[in-house]
Image: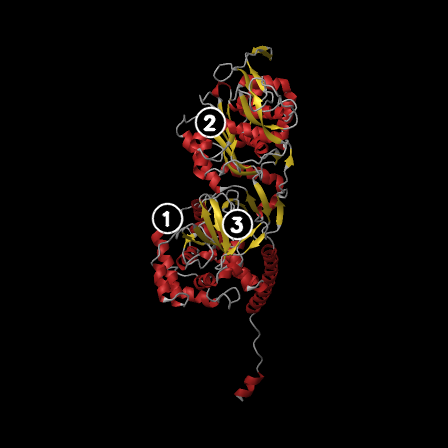
Amino acid sequence: MTAKKSRSKKSKPLNPIVKTIGWFCLKAALVLVLTLFIYLIYLDSKITTLFSGQKWQIPAQLYARALTLKTGTHLSQNQLLDELKRLQYSLDPRLNGPGQYHVQGNTVSVYRRAFDFPTGHQVATLLHIGFAGEFVQSLSTGKERKTLAVAQLEPQLLQHLVAAEQEDRELIQLAKVPRTIKDTLLLVEDRDFYSHHGVSLWSVIRAAWANMLAGKTVQGGSTLTQQLAKNMYTNQQRSYLRKINEALIALVLDYRYSKDQILEAYINEISLGQFKANPVHGLGLGSKLYFGKPLAELKPHEYALLIGIIKGPSFYDPRRFPKRAEDRRDLILGMMRDHGLLDESQWRAATDRPLDVIPLGDHLKGRFPAYIDKVRQELRAIVQDKSQLENGIRVFTYLDPMAQQAAEQAVLNRLTKLDKNIEAAMVVTDYQQGALKAIVGGRNTSFAGYNRAISAQRQIGSIIKPVVYLTALMQPARFHLGTVLADTPLNLKSGGRNWQPLNYDKKFRGNVPLIQALSESLNIPTVRLGLQLGLPALGQSLQKLGLQREVKLQPSSLLGAVEMSPLEVAQLYQTIANKGQYLELAAISAVTGQLGEPVYQRKVKAQSKIDASASYLLQYALQQATQTGTAQSLSQQFPRQRFAGKTGTSSDYRDSWFTGFDHETGVTVWLGRDDNKEIGLTGGSGALPVFSHYFQQLGANSLFRGVPENVTKQFVSKDSGRFVAESCVNVLLLPVIWGEMPVQTSCD
């Protein structure tokens, strides 16, 4: 009866409060799910927009010239070895990988690295370079030593054009990361990377257990994907909300992209320290920041340290805390041994090695602010789309590290012996290519301040005289090297005042041949010749030689009362040295995009501005200036070499100049004070020693010029300037442009 009553008894209704709470929870859950769904859609859009597009700002990379090797190249064995050291090649007789070299007698064997040149990709290659004195004697490749016509070493990285506070990195493709480095990275950072879906519950539990046992945080549970999410998409503030957000982003990343895409992004995103004001990201640049070489060339003790730094770039900074960094490295080396990435002997050898970290900043060789100032100037004209400067373009320049170092040493060697207020500028060119090889902008060669080589406008003194004489020699019917010029007192009116030019020694020589007037830099004959030619003719010659602006000329301009920068002077003498063939001097040779696509390629095509025969005669006279004239000290210091050049001194000894050239290199030097006060130095006593010291370091390639077909040697009377027979006395044997003047049968 009791059971029957119980079955017939009605169930009690739910408590209204419980029912309300239940409905509320259900609705809240639905709202939460909907919100999460919408948020995931938002995250997906945000993540794919960034991840699939331009993920990072990648600064433009500036490179020096690529050293070209071929038989006959003017290069010594020691100079090649210096180049290899700058490129961080290691001495290793095994030659079993790129970045190594070996010396045997007069031959240097180099395992050249692969590189994407502007002309295309070149694979890693074994080269053998034989030397004879200061020249390359032979060039071959491979174990069989097959003869090569030409080869190049990869260019030296000079600098990244990165603004203050911006991230700095060099992108590296996952395919170019050695397998051992990738395996070590995953071993340390995320062993289950290829098996989880962006978040690993097991990693969280394992880390939580380890932290609980230690009583403090000793292990993280974040996957590699979560770390990437934190670095790319969230801030660094510690909070549970941020961790949840990271996990959601990691899930989206893992769903949207392949594991290799995520790993490649991580390798390029991880923070590895700081250089100056710029955070350094990615293993590619990190390898160079700490070891000065590409990632693929790192040895186990090096990449173990690099991977160890990821955990805390400041805490494990090997330069500031070497013991702490070494302990971290050895811990990782032990993990590599335990997991079969190193055998026992490899582990022992790696742990016995020092850290081998290079000094901070040695990964970049760009302490050439004056040169890079010119590069930036040209880059503004070449790259119209400024966003390209943040897309990883590569800028290839003509800067020659050997020439730049020698130029800086030459300037410092001279200025340390002079008053500290005296400044200097220097421009070195490959005049046959119209290429700027080196630029020094002042006494402090590493200071990115006032660039005197480009910006300083100073009176050029006797540097202008060869332009006057060239103007005459371009008129062979009227003038030749033996033409007689009067060196007698001269009184002119200029600017409402009387002007009486004098020679340096205040003496008068009567009548002198044109070649003597130039080589000895005589003022009065130069003024007389210039006035005879006319100032407009001088202006036209300056324009032909490459001066890109008009200058106001007056009689005193014939002696150098014209203001130019050292770069402008170097441009004039580029055309003079290059047999009258004009090429605008440039710092940039090519620009390529991030993937190697061409952006700009300089086309070198010379313009014939000066008759080759007149140019030959002028060079002959400028050689005399270095043999018997105002620069004759060069013949004493370099008895077996020939140069052509000209000294220059402005009024009251305010400016000291020398510009000259050997067979392939032109050098222009200026010394003076920024306040334009007297320095008490002539071109010969001030600037010329800088020129000499430069070539003492690098060696000179003696100037040689083939004689033009219409130029021949002829005896010229020193008294009359007429062509005379060989039997006459008081004559000069000079090259002349033949056919313009008859030969006298009688002597004067």
As helix, strand or loop, the secondary structure at mark 3 comes to: strand
Residue 111: give x, y in percent of width and height: 47, 55
Q: Is residue 315 left or right of residue 566?
A: left
What residue did someone put label 3 on? 152
Residue nearer the viewer, 479 or 661: 479
* Three-letter code for the amino acid on which mark 3 is drawn: Gln
Dividing the picture into quadrants, the one containing residue 336 is: bottom left
Residue 11: give x, y in percent of width and height: 57, 78
Q: Is residue 681 left or right of residue 552?
A: left
Residue nearer the viewer, 617 or 634: 617
The quarter of the picture where the N terminus appears is: bottom right
Q: Are marks 3 and 2 in contact (CB under 8 Å)?
A: no
Q: Residues within 10 Å of mark 3 (few under 14, many from 20)?
A: some
Q: Is residue 42 left or right of residue 86?
A: right
As measured in the structure, the alpha-carbon distance from the residue carrying label 3 to the one carrying label 2 is 38 Å
* Three-letter code for the amino acid on which mark 1 is drawn: Arg
What residue did someone put label 2 on? 632
The quarter of the picture where the C terminus appears is: top right
